[in-house]
Amino acid sequence: MMGMLNSTSPNAMPRATLSEIRKRQGELGQFFTPAPVAEFMASLFGPLPEVVRLLDAGAGTGALTAAFISRLCKKKGRVRAIEATLYELDPLIQETLSRSMRDCKRACVKSGIQFRFTIHASDFIREMSILLSGDLFSAPPPTYDAAITNPPYKKIATDSAARRALSSIGIETSNLYTGFIALIQRLLIPGGQLVGITPRSFCNGPYFRPFREDFLGNLALRRLHVFESRNAAFRDDSVLQENVIFHALKGLSQPHELMISSSSGEHGAAIVESTLPFTEVVHPHDEEKFIHIPSDPRHTLAKETLVSLSSTLGDLGISVSTGRVVDFRHKNSLREEPEEGTAPLIYSCHFNGGSVCWPKPHSRKPNAILDNSETHSWLVPTGTYVLTKRFTAKEERRRLVACVLDAKNIRAKWLGFENHLNYFHANGRGLNRNVAIGLYAYLNSTVVDQYFRRFSGHTQVNASDLRTLSYPNLHSLHAMGTEMQTLDLSQGQIDDLVAKHLNADTQT
Ligand SMILES: C[S@@+](CC[C@H](N)C(=O)[O-])C[C@H]1O[C@@H](n2cnc3c(N)ncnc32)[C@H](O)[C@@H]1O
């Protein structure tokens, strides 16, 4: 069977075809699953019925179905027939996909398993949305016992045909991959199994909340697996995404416990497994339904620390918002340098260690924005604010990068925070300076970073992520801020200071 997998790999295809495929990857959200990852995914299925109706939506060159078949042929279990249905839109890989399925058929014949396959060279989203619409004149939707998928990853615009098709059956989502999973879930029979590999981005963030509700409300998680290295699993396609593999069952209740595992994503790398209560993965009172994947013992320790803190941002009278100035909407009001009638405009390029360095000479970004009737409502009164980057560089040590904008360093009445920042404020105004410095230390601590990594597999930091954290009480934040003589501390010094005050916080 390995030979068959190799023959279906894009690397084995003629050069011209491969380069055409590469060109179309962006358009089609196309990334092929490496054979070892496909084999691992196939190994996650539990017992299957004697006749398996298998769905592979976004089949590519068929690597996932091939791995599934290979596994069943080797296992010689009770499965005696497989009916595979594959959807693949790209005309350029149809021939390779058919060849791969013919190889699968030969392998099945040798193992005494009947194999039938149907390839639909059509749009899975469009077809399934029609079939699932319940329209009296359309055929009933097909049903499946098992699905294996690496769906296409691509944002779908609000006015796109895919978005409209999904909306028409009540699926609201902004990415093709979540649209695929939501459809596949609907096509499974009760108890039907889904093994998928997707970006981890659906596990947190406000845009994926309706998807998480749909996913967790209809599929019982059995296993989650993450790759520690951001790009090892899909290295061939240089994808910079943290990916998650999940195994889930349709229509059952969430288990008491499930297995979480991780590996480096390198071929043959060791898999580290642990069994955790489901309540560790989705916290029972979390309205956002974040999916935590504590794949590292430090993630578990971080949770212990954060749950011992009793304050929410609301309790502290503090809010966090996304910077309100969307610069391209105010192009005519942006100024490279401050001048009469302008307000400081703060971008992440103004972050300088723990503080804000403004104005920044020869900056790539404008330093100021005209304060006029069009822009004023997007500005905030000058004060002391804690800022975090919304997008950290992949090389940055921490996912959360915070700094303090100190009122005493800005001579202006109003200022603007650009949309790539989040800012902590008190009802739209600045914070008490010592509390702000304490908050700065807390957000930059390793323990918060480790907690953050439980639910976020990417470098984007949403304001809603920051709202779900628990925080030290005001007294501790103030004490931390008071003790900090300088913002310029090493990571070790920040961690020691935070640990000392968190201990005191939990005892009050
Ligand atoms: C991420 S790739 C995965 C391919 C394959 N399953 C694998 O694991 O190697 C997703 C595939 O979905 C296909 N695709 C994209 N949009 C599609 C659609 N609307 N309907 C069917 N296939 C689609 C792409 O052409 C691509 O081959």
Image: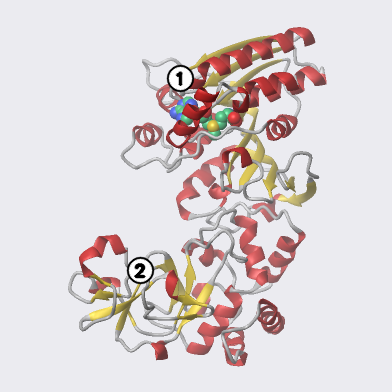
Say whether mark 2 is within 8 Å of ligand 1. no
Where 479 falls versus 72 (above or below)? below
Percent of width and height locating residue 211: 50, 44
Residue beneath disc 2: 365
Identify the residue at image location x=49%, y=50%: 209
Give the position of the C terminus as an image quadrant: bottom right
Residue beneath disc 1: 91
Which residue is farthest front? 15
Other-residue count near label 2 (Cα within 10 Å), few / some / many at <14 / 14–19 / ≥20: some
Where 450 falls versus 136 (above or below)? below
Hey, which quadrant is residue 451 in on the image? Answer: bottom right
Residue 116 seen in the current view: yes
Amino acid, disc 2: Lys
Q: Looking at the image, which is closer to me, 172 or 268?
A: 268
Tell me which label, 1 or 2, sits earlier in the chain: 1
Identify the residue at image location x=40%, y=32%: 169
Q: Secondary structure at mark 2?
A: loop
Q: Secondary structure at mark 1?
A: helix
Q: Looking at the image, which is closer to me, 235 or 385?
A: 235
428 sits to left or right of 251:
left
Identify the residue at image location x=70%, y=78%: 492
Q: Looking at the image, which is closer to me, 378 or 142?
A: 378
Percent of width and height locating residue 448: 63, 69
Residue 234 seen in the current view: no
Identify the residue at image location x=54%, y=30%: 184
Amino acid, disc 1: Pro
Percent of width and height locating residue 394: 57, 58
State the separation of the CA atoms marked 1 and 2: 43 Å
